[in-house]
Amino acid sequence: QVQLVESGGGSVQAGGSLRLSCAASGSTSCWYDMSWYRQAPGKEREFVSSIDHGGSASYADSVKGRFTISQGNAKNRVYLQMNSLKPEDTAMYYCKTDLVGGAWYCPTKYNIWGQGTQVTVSS
């Protein structure tokens, strides 16, 4: 069973940077479409960024130009570089993956979530 482990959260002042990491426990021969979501207290979970197994990325308007998503050399890892952080970026950040094929033994599974990593930006 594939599991996700996030790391890299923390506390930073406005204008600072953090880099989040997410690693999937499955085979690197499988294809992972990976996304980051965030949820602030009292708010719904919202999309932040995604990258598919081919490397195509997308971003929420609120983070465009500040955040960059990238894949590791092993395609079961994804990173979120967050620059020019704002207090409104404060949230629990969650990694999500969809397994969408790859080697013959790779399953197809959707909506696998990590436990989250906290990002706090102070003004």
Image (cartoon, rainbow, N blue to C red):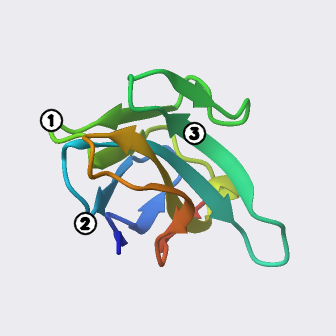
Q: Position of residue 8 (x, y in %)?
A: 32, 63
Where residue 69 sits, quadrant-wise, is top left
Whether residue 7 sits left or right of residue 73 in the image: it is right
The answer to which of marks 3 and 1 sits earlier in the sequence is: 3
Residue type, numbered disc 1: Asn
Q: Is residue 90 above or below residue 81?
A: below
Q: Is disc 3 in contact with disc 1, using a CB cutoff of under 8 Å?
A: no
The answer to which of marks 3 and 2 sits earlier in the sequence is: 2
Report the quarter where the N terminus lies: bottom left
Q: Position of residue 42 (x, y in %)?
A: 84, 77
> Dot 3 lies on which element?
strand
The answer to which of marks 2 and 1 sits earlier in the sequence is: 2
Whole-angstrom CA distance, mark 3 to mark 2, is 21 Å
Report the quarter where the C terminus lies: bottom right
Q: Position of residue 53 (x, y in %)?
A: 39, 32
How many numbered marks have been drawn onto this rendered protein structure? 3
> Dot 1 lies on which element?
loop
> On the image, numbered disc 2 is attached to which residue?
25
Of the pair 29 and 12, the residue shown nearer to us: 29
> Dot 2 lies on which element?
loop
**Category of crowding for the residue at label 1, using alpha-carbon neighbours closer than 10 angstroms: few (below 14), some (14–19), many (at least 20):** few
Where residue 83 sits, quadrant-wise, is top left
Whole-angstrom CA distance, mark 3 to mark 1, is 19 Å
**Marks 3 and 1: which is nearer the front?**
1
Q: Is disc 2 in contact with disc 1, using a CB cutoff of under 8 Å?
A: no
> On the image, numbered disc 1 is attached to which residue?
73
Disc on res. 65: none
> On the image, numbered disc 3 is attached to which residue?
49
